[in-house]
Image: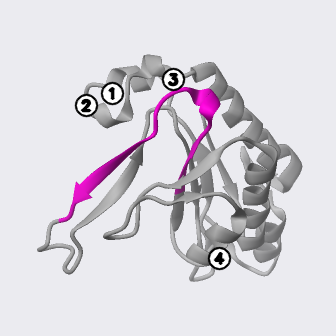
Amino acid sequence: MNYDFFADGSDKIELLDYIFQETDLEIFDSYSPYDQEIRKYKKTAEIISNFDLESGGQFAVTFQLWSPNFQGKVNFKKIELDQNRVKGHKFRYATEGSGLIQLYFGGHQNNILHHSHIGHQSEKRASAWENTNPGMGKAIEWNWKEIASTSRKLKSHIHNKMAVRKIGANGILKGAQKLFEQGTILQ
C-alpha cells in the first residue's frame, strides 16, 4: 500500500499527535544522524525539537513505523561511511524490517510543497527480496494482515478525516490547502 498526501508543518504535527495518542505505532528514524544511533520517539515534541517539519525538499524527514502487533523484528544496521565522500563522519544506522510502514514528510521549498507519503511492502515483495538483505528479516516472521490493517487505518485517517480536498487519490490537508491558496505549487 502506498499513499501520497500534502501536509504543511501543522498538518504533520496533527498527524504525529494522532499516531502517538491513538495508535500503538512506534516511530524510529529511517536513518540516524551521522555518528549517532537511531532515535525512537515517544511524543510529537521530541520530533519537533529534532526536525524542521516545514522546510525542505522531497522526503525531507523520514521515519519507520512499527507496532508490536506486526510481530517482526526491527533491525538497526550500522553503515560504515566512506571517508572520501563523508568527511569527518564514520558511521550511521538504518532502520530495517520488511514489515515496517514508511512515513516520509515532504518539505516546502522554493514555493513548492513536496508530497508526503505512507506505505509498506507486500508479503509477496518482502518474500522475493528477503535473501537480498538479511537485515530485513524473513517475511514469514511478520503479521501481514495486521500491517495492512494498520496501514489502511492510517491512510483512512489522513484521507477521510484530515484531508479537506483531494487531487486524484491524494489528500490535501488543511495547512497544505492554505499554502496552495496562497500560490504554492503542490508536487
Mark 2 surroundings within 10 Å by alpha-carbon count, few (fewer than 14), some (14 through 19), many (20 or more) = few
Can you identify the residue that label 4 sits on? 54
Can you identify the residue that label 1 sits on? 129
**Residue 161 to residue 7: above or below:** above
**Nearest to the observer: residue 14 or residue 183:** 14
- Numbered disc 3: secondary structure: loop
The number of callouts visible is 4
Q: What stretch is highlighted in magenta?
A: 63-81
**Does residue 108 appear anywhere in the picture?**
no
C-alpha separation, residue under disc 3 versus residue under disc 4:
34 Å
Looking at this view, name the residue that lies furthest to the left.
84
C-alpha separation, residue under disc 2 versus residue under disc 3:
17 Å
C-alpha separation, residue under disc 1 versus residue under disc 2:
5 Å
**Does residue 182 appear anywhere in the picture?**
yes
Nearest to N terminus: mark 3 or mark 4: 4
Mark whose residue sits in front, 2 or 3: 3
For the point 25% across and 64% down, the residue is 91
Q: Quadrant of the N terminus?
A: top right
Mark 4 surroundings within 10 Å by alpha-carbon count, few (fewer than 14), some (14 through 19), many (20 or more) = many
Can you identify the residue that label 3 sits on? 142
Residue 123 horizontal/vertical position (percent): 49, 21
Nearest to N terminus: mark 1 or mark 3: 1
